[in-house]
Each structure stands twice: as structure tokens, then as C-alpha cells.
């Protein structure tokens, strides 16, 4: 990617001459990588009506296509009965996660989708005959802070059944690439056919910065 960057950013035939510092290339590449991932995510998000009480699979990402190298899932455990007054609580760290995309409840060898409910609608939903929680139709509310999210899972209209575990899927934060001349080598973990787009975007940012600097 560094070589391709120089081919596009420098004069023709000068790609082997290091007129651009590796750390400068890394900065532009990492910004372009983040922008590319975000643009793919934005292109796959479905809008949800603000009046909808329950959201199910509120975002769709093509894990077998563009972001397949970043799409991950993990199982985790929590504590609680899953009832209205004692929900099954799970804490998930988000330091290496760009976006958490969905939750599943694992119970006695079966997998059940977990619906997401707004906190303001929790009471009405739990007591709604059609939308209320059941062990095979769990729902949850989500709160969090900068470094983690907390999942409160409900598996019954009043009393609940604690899941065996919770499975969550997410888009991991892409690698921060680093040239070996700058530090420990870190390669881009996007799939290869996106590399051209990333490098071209990085070059455009670099050239615009040069033009702005010269103009000032």
C-alpha cells in the first residue's frame, strides 16, 4: 500500500524514492481506512421509524462481502433471572469494537434473536400481550458509556428464564496500519479488493493538504 501510495502521489517513476515520510503515509491510510469502513456501514443501515417500540435486526451488514474480515461474534455470560425486576445483565467491552450489530440468546441448544426496546417503552412492551418478552422471544434494553455497553435481557412478561449465554456480533475496529520503518509492522485487515479505494482516498487527502499548504 505504501508503494502504491507513492506511485499515485509522486511523479511517475519516483515510487521507489521516499519523498514522503512513511509516518505521513500511515496517517493518511488510517484515516482513509476508517472512512471506507464507515461509508460501507452507512450504506447498509436501514432507517427505523422513531415510533417503533421494538427494533429487530435494526442494521444489516454484509458480513460475507466487504466487511467480512472485520465481522466477528463472541459469546458471553451475565447474571440475573431475566425477570422484570431482575433482568439478565451482560456487560460488553467496546474498546476494540467499531459497532455492535446484534444480539442472540442461547438457551438449551437453541438460538433466539433478541429484540431491542427503547428504555421509555420498556414497561409498556413487557406488559403488551403481543410484544412482551418470552424465553423464545427475548428483548433487551441497552445503556452504556465510552468503553462498554450494558445489556438488560428480559425473557418473560413477569418471571424470566436466565439464558445459558448471550451471543453478540460486531464490526471490529480496523487495524491501525504501521510501516516497519515507523514501529512494529501492522498490516491493513480489510479485504484486498478495498485496498485500491483506500489508497486512492489517502492520496487525495494528501494532495489536497499539499495544495492547501502551498496556497497559504
Image (tube, rainbow, N blue to C red):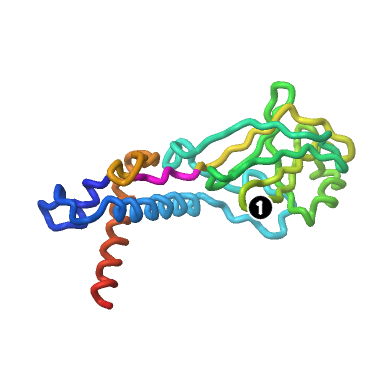
> Please, what is the dominant secondary structure of the magenta stretch?
loop
Seen from this angle, which residue lies furthest top? 109
- Residue 139 shown left or right of residue 97 in the figure: right
- Residue 67 shown left or right of residue 153 in the figure: left
> Magenta stretch containing residue 161, yes or no?
no
Kindly state the secondary structure of the residue where label 1 is placed: loop
Image quadrant where one finds the N terminus: top left
The residue wearing badge 1 is: 145
Question: Of 186 and 85, which appears nearest the observer?
Answer: 186
Q: Residue at x 63, y 55 (%)?
A: 48
Question: What range is drawn magenta here?
Answer: 173-178
Q: In the rendering, at what x and y percent does residue 211 appear?
A: 25, 70
Q: Residue at x 48, y 41 (%)?
A: 62
Task: Check disc 1: other Cα within 10 Å, few if <14, some if 14-19, many if 20+.
Answer: few
Quadrant of the image occupied by residue 56: top right
Quadrant of the image occupied by residue 134: top right
Quadrant of the image occupied by residue 208: bottom left
The answer to whether 50 is drawn above or below residue 91 in the figure is: below
Amino acid at each position: 500500500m505504501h508503494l502504491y501510495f507513492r506511485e499515485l502521489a509522486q511523479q511517475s517513476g519516483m515510487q521507489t524514492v521516499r519523498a514522503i515520510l512513511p509516518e505521513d503515509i500511515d496517517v493518511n491510510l488510517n484515516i482513509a481506512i476508517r472512512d471506507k469502513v464507515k461509508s460501507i456501514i452507512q450504506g447498509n443501515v436501514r432507517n427505523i421509524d422513531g415510533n417503533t417500540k421494538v427494533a429487530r435486526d435494526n442494521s444489516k451488514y454484509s458480513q460475507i462481502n466487504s466487511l467480512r474480515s472485520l465481522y466477528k461474534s463472541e459469546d458471553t455470560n451475565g447474571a440475573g433471572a431475566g425477570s422484570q425486576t431482575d433482568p439478565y445483565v451482560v456487560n460488553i467491552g467496546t474498546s476494540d469494537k467499531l459497532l455492535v450489530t446484534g444480539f442472540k440468546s442461547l438457551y438449551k441448544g437453541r438460538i433466539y434473536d433478541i429484540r431491542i426496546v427503547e428504555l421509555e417503552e420498556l414497561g409498556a412492551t413487557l406488559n403488551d400481550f403481543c410484544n412482551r418478552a418470552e424465553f423464545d422471544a427475548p428483548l433487551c434494553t441497552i445503556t452504556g458509556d465510552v468503553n462498554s455497553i450494558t445489556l438488560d435481557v428480559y425473557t418473560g412478561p413477569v418471571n424470566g428464564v436466565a439464558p445459558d449465554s448471550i451471543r453478540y456480533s460486531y464490526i471490529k475496529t480496523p487495524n491501525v496500519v504501521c510501516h516497519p520503518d515507523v514501529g512494529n509492522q501492522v498490516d491493513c485487515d480489510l479485504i484486498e479488493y478495498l485496498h485500491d479505494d483506500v489508497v486512492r482516498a489517502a492520496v487525495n487527502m494528501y494532495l489536497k493538504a499539499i495544495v492547501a499548504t502551498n496556497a497559504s
